[in-house]
Image (cartoon, coloured by chain):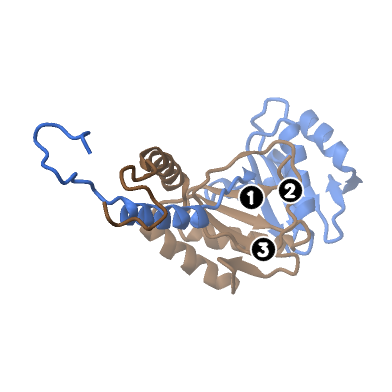
Chain colours: A blue, B brown
Amino acid sequence: MAKRSILSEDEPTEIDLAPMIDCVFILLIFFIVATVFVEEQGLQVSKPDAAATVSPEENENVVVQIAADNKIYFEDKEISLADVVNRVRANVAEGETPVVVRAHEKSSHGAFIAVWDAARRGGAETLSFTTTH
Amino acid sequence: MQRRSILSEPEAPTRIDLAPMIDCVFILLIFFIVTTVFVEPPGVEIVKPDATLDADLEKNSILVGITADNKVVYGGKVLAIAGVGARVKQLLNREELPVIIQADAQADHGVFSDVWSEVKNAGARKISVSTRKD
């Protein structure tokens, strides 16, 4: 045991690291187990503000309706999902016209998200949704 | 050095140098401490709808689930729609967090709309809908 320097006496003072390693391992295992890697993708949706609903809807807004059977209507005509993109693009020329998705409460959430996404692709910037009964 | 047994030679105590291992373990530990966010996933199976214009959402958020049979779930427990607002408000009092609604594609839009309103009334600033990863 000649490793130690001038200060050390015969007994080499060594710190027993084993208990510390035990602690660190327990911490490590706790954090490994507690870690959940949440990676969510999604989009933000909004309802019209209370102030904005004062204006009458039909005249200024582009309204896309979803019926209870998930069919999409635009100006009382049934259209396909691909058509939503075109119709919104045609009617939202300046990008400022509000687009409202009016979904029936019994329509599926998937249909609603599909229409919402299509309207966004059509260039709608102020989008909101309302629910009909 | 009389600790060793019969087999060992008297002079050389074989000792493993633990320092590099401790270094590694510490680095792992710090990595996991830093990356851990305590998010409670809904804990139910949800088939999310598909969208093309979706973005990555915050990792640390409140997750509210809606299953295909229109049950509202938070942290593995089924809540009444009216209870969602209170629960979210309680969580937001502790920390300002964004809320993500994970709704099943087959869930009713009405339930989603009610949950959205509840969360909004609870004071959430940012409410997002979760979509499928592409």
Q: Do circles 3 and 2 both sit on a common chain?
A: no
Q: What residue did someone put label 2 on?
A: A113
Residue B129's label in the rendered image is 1
Q: Residue A98 location, x and y as percent?
A: 66, 38
Which amino acid, mark 2?
Ile
Q: Quadrant of residue A41?
A: top right
Element carrying mark 3: strand
Q: Quadrant of the C terminus of chain A?
A: bottom right
Q: Nearer the viewer, residue A93 or B43?
A: B43
Distance Cα–Cα, label 2 vs label 1: 9 Å
- Considering every residue shown, the one lying at the far top of the view is A94
Q: Do the residues bearing badges 2 and 1 touch, measured as CB atoms within 8 Å?
A: yes
Q: What residue did someone put label 3 on?
A: B66
Tag 1 or tag 3, which sits nearer the N-term? Answer: 3
> Which residue shows up at 13% across the image and 43% down it?
A10
- Residue B94 lies left or right of residue B100; in this view the side is left
| In this view, A29 is above or below A89 | below
